[in-house]
Image: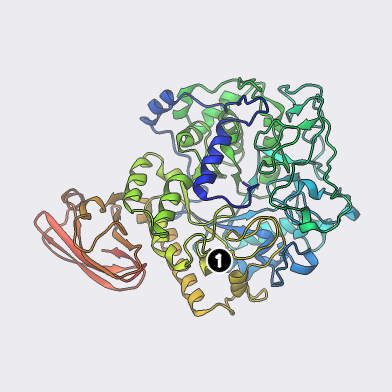
Amino acid sequence: MHLSIYSKSSRQKAWLLSAFALALVASCGKAQVQNQTPATEVKKMAEKPAPVTAPAEVQAGKVVVYQMFTRLFGNSNNTNQPWGTIAQNGVGKFNDINEAALKGIKELGASYVWYTGILHHAVIRDYSAYGISHDDPDVVKGRAGSPYAVKDYYSVNPDLAVDPAKRLEEFDALIDRTHAQGLKVIIDIVPNHVARHYQSLHKPEGIEDFGASDDTSVEYKRDNNFYYVVGQPFQVPAPQNGYQPLGGEAHPLSDGKFAENPAKWTGNGSRLAQPDFNDWYETVKVNYGVKPDGSYDFDRLPADYATKSVQEHAAFWQGKDVPNSWLKFRDITFYWLDKGVDGFRFDMAEMVPVEFWSFLNSSIKSKNPNAFLLAEVYNPALYRDYIRLGKMDYLYDKVEMYDSLKLVMQGTGSTDAIASVQQGMADIEHHMLHFLENHDEQRIAAPEFAGDANKAKPAMVVSALISSSPTMLYFGQEVGEAGALDSGFGDPSRTSIFDYAGVPAHQNWLNDGKYDGGRLTPDQKQLREFYAKLMTLSATEAVFNGAYHELHSSNKDTAGYSDKTYAFARFNDKTKVIVASNFATTVTSFALKLPADLLQQWQLGKGDYELKDLLSERKASLKVTGDQASVQIELAALESVVLKF
């Protein structure tokens, strides 16, 4: 997802995104409600879990996804001039991501690399020599452009190629290099919207551009790809806070105008010919057969399909007449699967009807049963719909786990929330991807977030080890990147996705293309070593796919244990582990109690049991006396232990 506003707290953003997902902003004040199964029916379905689709790769431990913002990853240039050109600030290329870079990612326990921003999106640079049309700064955010304003779904960003004429071949080679290192490839698909000016140069024979056959004389028609503001031309939004495209630099197309008649609905759902400056005005909304009055022009998915397999979903859609946009996105995903892509991260999935996801994901799984399907969904009330009816493998656990951990890291929240979130997710926890950073969120080290990358350590232990869910790392997180640069469009605290820039802490590991950490500070080295050890532990220890038992509730009255501490147990038939984390910036010590029901499950008799901390090699002892047991734990500031029997 791409923010149109300069700064917004995560909680405010979550509210906005949920609001966008449930309604389109109407010029007449009328909202278009998205297609959902009634809540009462979903609640009934929750009592009977759906068949679980196997993860894309069978491994001992859990899936780890490394999110790379591809444009920035290999860039060694540290000029960082606001609104700087590609010549001034540099850009990372596909070819920069070499064997050494991929080995470094593999050291972090990764099994997948999400190459963010590789699709050809609108960008302010002259590529007319390659047949690429110019993009207008009035409807492009930043100089390098938003990766979520896709201009050509069958090609890749020419900025990322050494030879733009061979950009697809260079990406093909990157896919091969990634696979050679035992890593799999994820790319973005953005079904809700496309760039204001969509034009595919590389579409296969028989494929038609979005909107090419639309009847623009009507607001809506089922097989139109877009919605139209009939009789009104598009007008560029009135700028706010002194904003000027390209920072005020003169450009032939920067004139406050963009030719589009009739105007199309904007990506976030605005039906105004002149959207607001905070709307996603660089994009247009894709029509999936949802009428302006909120009714549907496609077959509804019966509620009992929440318990049916992906094969049964595929069979449901066989022979059904579906909107044209559904077919276009099926063709797009098949194209990339044929190129060797192993999965997709779906942007703003909740803004697209769940029936479409049933159709698309069952089609994808029919072609590649092991495809990795991750969706950006922010409304917890929709999670089970998009997993069970939409057949998603994984969803962002943003509003529940991430937001709870963020408040604890900032010192304003209680670890009590962690226990509550995990309990509430018990039936779907395997499907909820955990993260502490991504391209939409503030960097942990940013003053606007926590001001210290070390404050992520206990949160990362909890996030990575508390459930069988996958874990995602954002590039630079492992070395404490602070996102402090003013790169042009947007405010500091988030690493820019709109402009050309270098990423300072990451560049210390990049070390002019050596990817050896040669310029890391001692603190940065220590942080990366912590992430490497923790994430490798998560990825290789089968116990973290086992059972979970929270120890927090039974220890809230234990001396030294507070709401800045969190403890839990993980176990399977072979291994037992106790995890305890200290979110406080002071030392704490306590005798952690194990409840009687857990002792019974573990079948522990009286005696002393030696435990080893998998993070530090320290030893501890669990004392069992009858139906009582405890282990003495001492934790330094922001420290965790992972005690294995």
Q: In this image, 48 relative to 64: left or right?
A: left
Q: Quadrant of residue 235?
A: top right
Q: In this image, 354 relative to 557: left or right?
A: right
x then y, percent, for residue 475: 57, 62
Question: Looking at the picture, does residue 222 appear above or below residue 589?
Answer: above
Q: Residues within 10 Å of mark 1 (few under 14, many from 20)?
A: many
Residue placed under numbered mark 1 in the picture: 482
Seen from the viewer's position, the closer of residues 477 and 371 is 477
x then y, percent, for residue 368: 59, 42
* Residue occupying image coordinates x 49% and y 47%: 11
Dot 1 falls on a residue whose secondary structure is loop
Q: Is residue 469 visible?
A: no
Question: Looking at the picture, does residue 448 appear above or below residue 215?
Answer: below
x then y, percent, for residue 17: 56, 40
Q: In this image, 314 relative to 280: left or right?
A: left
* Residue occupying image coordinates x 52% and y 45%: 12
- Farthest residue in the left direction? 626
x then y, percent, for residue 301: 54, 23
Q: How is the image coloured?
A: rainbow
